[in-house]
Image (spheres, grey):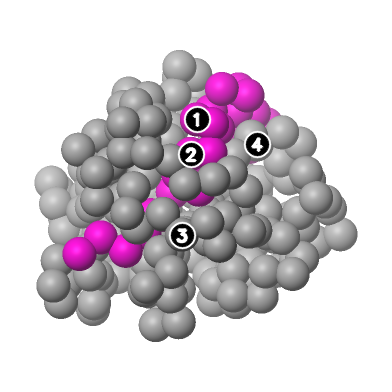
């Protein structure tokens, strides 16, 4: 699944930059508010711990049938980091190993156990998190839609997310990405599923104009 190598994604207000280990210092501040973890779980991590986690994620999945795609969200105006978006891409009948979570759902990947079958293509479980100071500005929606469009253009057919039933803001982001809630629960969260539409976000810029 070599086609799922993150590249820079451009939106009107944001740059989605492929995750690097040296993003950890700034991202530790972005994710430092304990209230941010009410729904996503875990707790704020120190920069050193976050760097180690990012190093594991950048190294990629040990499963050749799975791709880990991580971006940091950079706000064009000011150049500050505001959060992350991520996708675990796997074949429709594959599953991610438990180690793929990286130890924190805010900055790692979720287990794709019992994934709904995709219609002739890979499944991507997507997630997003935006730091408290940048919330309420539509940044998560803009970033997640851009990522969803990138995935659709790369051949992903089904998107999935797991969202706490009380997390209305995250549900709104999922709806904007074309996902709808199902009656399936996983680890106390509702599974949302939808098709990956190529037009869900702007085209990326990078190698071959597709972020490779």
**Front disc: 2 or 3:** 3
Label 4 vs 1, first from the N-terminus: 1
Task: Tell which of 30 and 176 is nearer to you.
Answer: 30
Q: Mark 2 points at which residue?
A: 108
**Front disc: 1 or 3:** 3
Task: Tell which of 98 and 136 is nearer to you.
Answer: 136
Q: Is mark 2 on a helix, strand or loop?
A: loop
Q: Distance between the residues labelled 1 and 3?
A: 20 Å
**What residue sits 66% from the left and 75% below the top?**
168
What is the span of residues highlighted in magenta in the rendered image? 80-108
**Front disc: 4 or 3:** 3
Q: Position of residue 154 (x, y in %)?
A: 38, 49
Q: Name the residue under label 1.
A: 102
Q: What element carries label 1?
A: loop
Dot 2 crowding, Cα within 10 Å, few <14, some 14–19, many 20+:
many
Q: Name the residue under label 4.
A: 112
Label 1 vs 3, first from the N-terminus: 3
Q: Position of residue 115 (x, y in %)?
A: 71, 40
Q: In which quarter of the image is the N terminus?
A: top left
| Residue 102, magenta (yes or no) | yes
Q: Distance between the residues labelled 4 and 3?
A: 28 Å
Q: Is mark 3 on a helix, strand or loop?
A: loop
Dot 4 crowding, Cα within 10 Å, few <14, some 14–19, many 20+:
many
**What residue sits 49% from the left and 19% below the top?**
63
**Front disc: 4 or 1:** 1
């Amino acid at each position: 699944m070599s086609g799922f190598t993150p590249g820079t994604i451009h939106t009107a207000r944001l740059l989605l930059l492929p995750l690097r280990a040296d993003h950890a210092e700034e991202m530790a501040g972005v994710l430092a508010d304990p209230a941010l973890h009410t729904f996503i779980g875990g707790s704020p991590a120190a920069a050193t711990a976050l760097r180690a986690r990012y190093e594991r994620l950048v190294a990629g999945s040990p499963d050749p049938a799975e791709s880990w795609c991580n971006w940091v969200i950079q706000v064009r105006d000011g150049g500050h980091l505001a959060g992350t978006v991520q996708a675990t891409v796997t074949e429709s009948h594959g599953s991610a190993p438990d180690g793929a979570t990286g130890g924190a759902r805010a900055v790692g990947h979720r287990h794709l156990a019992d994934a709904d079958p995709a219609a002739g293509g890979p499944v991507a479980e997507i997630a997003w998190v935006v730091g408290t100071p940048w919330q309420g500005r539509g940044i998560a929606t803009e970033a997640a839609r851009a990522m969803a469009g990138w995935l659709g253009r790369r051949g992903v057919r089904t998107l999935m997310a797991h969202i706490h039933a009380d997390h209305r803001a995250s549900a709104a982001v999922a709806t904007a990405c074309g996902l709808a809630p199902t009656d399936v629960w996983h680890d106390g969260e509702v599974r949302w599923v939808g098709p990956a539409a190529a037009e869900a976000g702007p085209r990326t810029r990078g190698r071959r104009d597709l972020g490779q």
